[in-house]
Each structure stands twice: as structure tokens, then as C-alpha cells.
């Protein structure tokens, strides 16, 4: 009676061992032929919008998270002070033009008198120099006018491209300081995905390989992509920070310490209809290596 039970146990044990070997082998070949990670994140170019001149905000033309097109007005700073600067610069030009005209007239009179030795050469040279100074002053005034017009144009702030306005807390009446970021602009033509792959997987990934991105919010709508590049530096907690510009990747621990994860940049080919990309959201990334490489 014990023999059949022993045989059954051996068969079951052997079957389980074979299944474990098969599953392990399949998982290994899958990891080699199709590196995959669920540690992915949607990214995009985020531009900090700041005014290039200071002043009180008199108009906010957008609302938070609004989609805008390149050239759309975002907000406007009170232009009165800058309009006055333009008028002042124009008045200075008129003055400089009159001074130049007078200097040229005086120069012509003195040079004519020099022909009969009625004046000295030194006086004639001084007259010529006065004309050159007056002309230089006029040129500087013209530059000042162009600068004033440029500052006036900066009182209207426009969208730098197609995208979304976000983190907008600006209100009419607020004071905008030169260079201080007021809102964030997400460039809708710059989305990509970072897939954070184990360093042991990188040998199976090359730029140009096909990639499939699956957003957690749209599991039924995979996005085709291509490997653009592989990160060349990472920083980990607990170590000296190499640079603030280097991505910091948290170390992962399980039963044993796992390999470090390295960002792989995936460029998206075409986003399916109905899928809205949001910076920072989660994605899974599978890479299909190009066997011809």
C-alpha cells in the first residue's frame, strides 16, 4: 500500500520540479527577448513662464489646466509705464536729431570759413568731432527706443507652443516681478515615457528598439513607441549626490538587493484617441529588441 503512495508523491514532486524549470526558463527567455518594467512614468517638457518686465497684472486670459495654442495670450502686465518710456525715447530722438542738424550746420559754416583761414584748424576739428558725438548720441537714442518698444511688447505674455497651462494661481491685481515664475506650461508636443529598467536588462535594450507603453489609466490602449536613449548617470539615496541634474532612483530591496534601475527614454509614436497624457502618471514599458542589431 505504501508503494503506490510513494510513486504518486514522486510523480507529483517530479512534475512540480519540471513545471518550475519550464516556468523559470520561459520567464528567463521572456526577460531576454522582451525586457519589461512596470516602473515607468510619463514625462514632458515643462516650461516655467515668467514675465521679462515687472508690473501689475491687469488681465489673466486663461484658467488653470486650460489647453492653449502657440501665440495665445496668457496674461498681461499694465503697459502704461512702458508706453511712457516709448514716448520719452521718441522725444529724445527728436532732440538728438535737432542737435545733429545744428552740429552739421555749424561744421559746414566753420569748414567754409577755414578755406579763407578765418578760423583755426583746431576749431574745424572740434566742429567735426561735435558732429560725430551728436550722431553717436542719436544712434544710442534709437537703440533706447527699440529697447523701450521691446519692453512694452513684453507686457503681453503668450504661450510658447501648443500645450497646457498648469499650476496657475495668478490673479488680476497681482504684481509680477521680472524673472519670477508665475505658472507652468506643459508642451503637448514633447511627451515621452521613462521606463526604469534593471541594469541587468540594459544589455538587451538598444536605441531604435520597438517599445510598447501601457498606461495604468488606459490598460486597454497600448501606445507604440521606440527606445530613444538610455540614461548615462543615476544617483541613489545614501550616496553623495553626483549632480542635481542627475535623476535619483530609489534602491529596491526584496529578499536580496536588486539591481539598480536606469531610466530608458521612450519616444511615443502615436497616442490613441481618448488617451490624455499627464506628466507623472504611471506606465508599464515592454521593449521588443531588434534582433537584426
Image: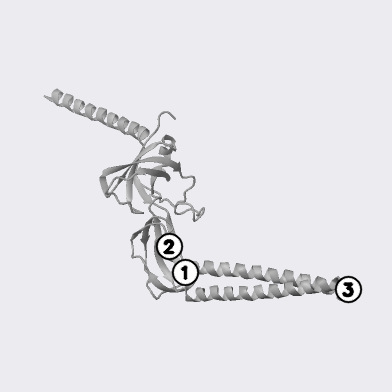
The location of residue 211, given as percent across then percent down, is: 36, 39
Depicted 134 relative to depicted 65: above or below: below
The residue located at (37%, 61%) in the rendering is 165
The numbered dot on residue 155 is: 1
Residue 212, located in which quarter of the rendered image?
A: top left
Residue where numbered disc 3 is placed:
117
Q: Where is residue 244 in the image (x, y as percent from the top left)?
A: 49, 56
Residue 22's x, y, as percent? Answer: 28, 29
Residue visible at 39% across and 40% down in the picture: 226
Q: In which quarter of the image is residue 187?
A: bottom left
Whether residue 258 is visible here, answered yes or no, is no
The C terminus lies in quadrant: top left
Query: Visible in this render: residue 84?
Result: yes
Q: Badge 1 local density, few (<14 within 10 Å), some, or many (20+)?
A: many
Task: State the residue in front, 61 or 115.
Answer: 115
Q: What x and y, as percent, mark residue 39?
A: 35, 47
Reply above or below: 14 against 142.
above
Secondary-structure class at tag 3:
loop
Q: Under tag 1, what secondary structure?
A: loop
Disc 2 element: strand
Q: Between 62 and 92, which is closer to the camera in this rendering?
A: 92
Looking at marks 3 and 1 on the same chain, the residue that comes earlier in the sequence is marked by 3
Q: Which of pointers 3 and 1 indicates the residue nearer the eye? A: 3
What residue would you read off at disc 2? 158
Q: Give left or right: position of 26 versus 71.
A: left
Q: Which of marks 2 and 3 is nearer the N terminus?
A: 3
Pointer 2 with pointer 3, Cβ within 8 A = no
Amino acid at each position: 500500500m505504501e508503494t503506490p503512495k510513494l510513486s504518486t508523491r514522486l510523480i507529483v514532486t517530479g512534475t512540480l520540479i519540471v513545471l518550475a524549470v519550464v516556468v523559470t526558463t520561459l520567464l528567463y527567455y521572456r526577460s531576454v527577448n522582451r525586457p519589461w518594467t512596470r516602473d515607468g512614468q510619463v514625462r514632458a517638457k515643462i516650461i516655467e513662464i515668467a514675465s521679462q518686465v515687472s508690473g501689475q497684472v491687469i488681465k489673466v486670459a486663461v484658467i488653470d489646466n486650460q489647453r492653449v495654442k502657440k501665440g495665445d495670450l496668457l496674461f498681461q502686465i499694465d503697459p502704461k509705464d512702458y508706453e511712457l518710456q516709448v514716448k520719452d525715447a521718441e522725444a529724445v530722438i527728436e532732440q538728438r536729431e535737432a542737435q545733429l542738424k545744428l552740429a552739421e550746420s555749424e561744421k559746414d559754416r566753420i569748414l567754409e570759413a577755414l578755406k579763407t583761414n578765418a578760423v583755426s584748424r583746431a576749431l574745424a576739428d572740434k566742429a567735426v568731432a561735435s558732429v560725430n558725438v551728436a550722431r553717436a548720441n542719436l544712434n544710442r537714442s534709437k537703440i533706447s527706443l527699440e529697447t523701450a518698444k521691446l519692453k512694452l511688447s513684453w507686457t503681453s505674455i503668450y504661450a510658447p507652443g501648443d500645450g497646457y497651462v498648469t499650476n496657475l494661481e495668478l490673479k488680476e491685481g497681482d504684481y509680477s516681478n521680472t524673472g519670477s515664475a508665475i505658472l507652468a506650461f506643459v508642451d503637448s508636443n514633447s511627451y515621452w515615457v521613462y521606463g526604469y529598467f534593471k541594469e541587468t536588462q540594459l544589455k538587451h535594450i538598444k536605441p531604435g528598439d520597438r517599445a510598447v507603453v501601457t498606461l495604468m489609466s488606459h490598460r486597454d490602449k497600448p501606445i507604440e513607441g521606440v527606445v530613444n536613449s538610455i540614461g548615462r548617470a543615476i544617483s541613489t539615496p545614501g550616496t553623495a549626490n553626483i549632480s542635481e541634474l542627475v535623476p535619483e532612483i530609489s534602491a529596491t530591496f526584496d529578499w536580496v538587493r536588486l539591481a539598480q534601475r536606469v531610466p530608458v527614454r521612450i519616444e511615443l509614436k502615436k497616442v490613441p484617441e481618448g488617451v490624455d497624457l499627464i506628466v507623472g502618471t504611471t506606465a508599464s514599458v515592454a521593449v521588443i529588441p531588434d534582433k537584426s542589431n
